[in-house]
Structures are given as structure tokens and as C-alpha cells.
Amino acid sequence: MPIPLKELLAVKVKTIPFPVAPFLKQAAQMLDGPRPDLEAVEELLSIDKQYLQRVINASVANSNHTAEDFEAALKLLGQKPMRDVVAELAEEAQANAVSLEPKVLEILKGPYWNHSQLTAICSHLLAQETGYPSLPQAYTAGLLHDVGRCILTEYDYNELAKALELPLLKTQVIENAEDQVHGYNHSYVGGAVLEEWKAAPAIIGPIKKHHAPRDADANQRLAKILHLADVAVSCQQAKLPIGITLFPVDRTLLKEPPFNKMPLLEIAAQAAKIQASLEEMAPLSI
């Protein structure tokens, strides 16, 4: 039995950061060893380049020299002090971690959960590569982009339409061209539910229009990132060329800077690798 709709709609959702703490802890543990694989350590830190930059900045702060990259920072700071810096950042990341409401997590953990996790990580990586200012927004948008789908599989259309004050048409799953192009049903319902949850407006617009990013009337930049993350993950999972999906793809976006220079399938594969690593470290309880 699904959670009573009234209870579900009373939830409040915060923007959540990518769970980087496990990777920082692993990097600190590796730096504890006598001969750490520095390339592997840098790869772990690079999952969130904001933390990598903070490591580099810490090395510069303790010397009269500059460091352009991790290798130079390590030479300036030394292995043990570097380990202490990374361990401290891991503790900070853990302290700042935010979890999803249990009711939301219960709804999300259905058939679309794996895709949502991958899209969240891919959205985080794309946001990082394109210089989007809020990685937590990108991650949260990816994780929640298909929340409307999850809700539509659990609740009666009439009940949803009444509770959300939406026309019944927009809560029905209608497999036709108009529905796909205009983002009715899951995209529209997802946006309406996020409004009920008092989610950040910066993610609501992109989620409502994640299949038609140029139509987003708010935060079109994140809508584009989210759209491409969804496309990249779908193609990578299906082992198809980029842009071959069961839903509409904004093909002009694939040619638009800076996205035209992004190896989207490789980034989606990296997201899958990161997700697998997270599951090995500890079950993902976002």
C-alpha cells in the first residue's frame, strides 16, 4: 500500500549534496599507506572538484608557493598533512550531508530508482564540467526528475488531480506525441508535487521541463544539464548511440557549446562507475 497521498504531499524537501564523504574517507585512508596510488587518490577527489580545489588551496596556504594541480599540492604539503586535510574535509562533508525524507525515499525506491541515481550523479558531473554554480541543485534535480513517474504508478489519477488541483488530463498517462512534447503527466505532476514539498524553485522548473529544456521558464541552464544527463544515462544503459531514446531529445542541444564538446556517454559511464563504488562502500541511503 502506498503512503496516504495527504501524508506524502505534506513532506518538505531540501536540496541535497552528492554523498562525497565516502570518497574523501577512502582518499584519506589511501594517503595513510606507505605508497599510495596518487592517481587513484586524485581521481577520488575529482568526483567533486570543489573539494579537490580546497585541498590544493590548503597546500598553498601553508607555503609561499603556488600549486596548479594535486601533484604539486602534495609536494608542497607532504603526504601526512595532506591526509589530515582530506580527512577533515571528509568529516565536514559527512556533517553537512542531508538525507531525503523517508516517505520520499520510499516512493523513489521503485523501478526507476537506479535510473534516478545515475541521472543524479551524471547531472552532478555535467554541472561540474560546465561550471554550474550549485552542484547540490544539479544532483537533487537528477535524483527527483522522475518523481512524477513514481507517483503516477502508485496513486489514482482522480485522487492526484484533486489533491494537486490539476486538470485530470495532466495526471493521466497518455502515450502520444502531444504528451511527450509538452511534458504532461510525469514531468508536470513531478513539478506540481515538488511545489507542494516546497522544493527550491531552481530545481522545479528544470524538472517540469526536463524533456523540453528550452521551454523551461526558470533556470533553463539546469534544465539543459538535466535533459542531457537523462539522455546520456538512458543511452548508456541501453548501449545505444547518444540521442537514440524512447523520449524526445533536443538534438540542437547536443551541438550547442559547451555540451557539444562533452563526451556524454563517457560521463554516463563514469556515473555508473561512481554509483557502483558507492554501493560497495555502503548502501546509498540518500
Image (cartoon, rainbow, N blue to C red):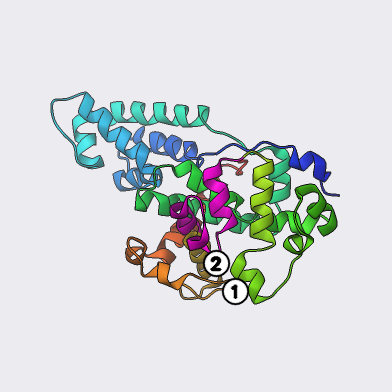
Check disc 1: other Cα within 10 Å, few if <14, some if 14-19, many if 20+: few
Q: Are marks 1 and 2 in contact (CB under 8 Å)?
A: yes
Q: Would you say residue 208 sits in the magenta stretch?
A: yes
Residue furthest left in the image:
64
Residue bounds of the magenta highlight: 199-226
Identify the residue shown where x is 56% and y is 40%: 200
Q: Position of residue 39 (x, y in %)?
A: 30, 48
The residue that mark 1 highlights is 246
259 is higher (above) or lower (below) than 83: below
Whether residue 147 is visible here, answered yes or no, is no
Relative horizontal placement of residue 42, taking residue 29 as reference (left or right) = left
252 is higher (above) or lower (below) than 136: below
Relative horizontal placement of residue 130, taking residue 79 as reference (left or right) = right
Q: Position of residue 259 (x, y in %)?
A: 37, 62
Q: Which amino acid, by three-letter code, is at mark 2?
A: Ser
Badge 1 element: loop
Q: Would you say residue 210 sits in the magenta stretch?
A: yes
The residue that mark 2 highlights is 234
State the image quarter where residue 68 is shown: top left
Distance in Å between CA atoms under marks 1 and 2: 9 Å
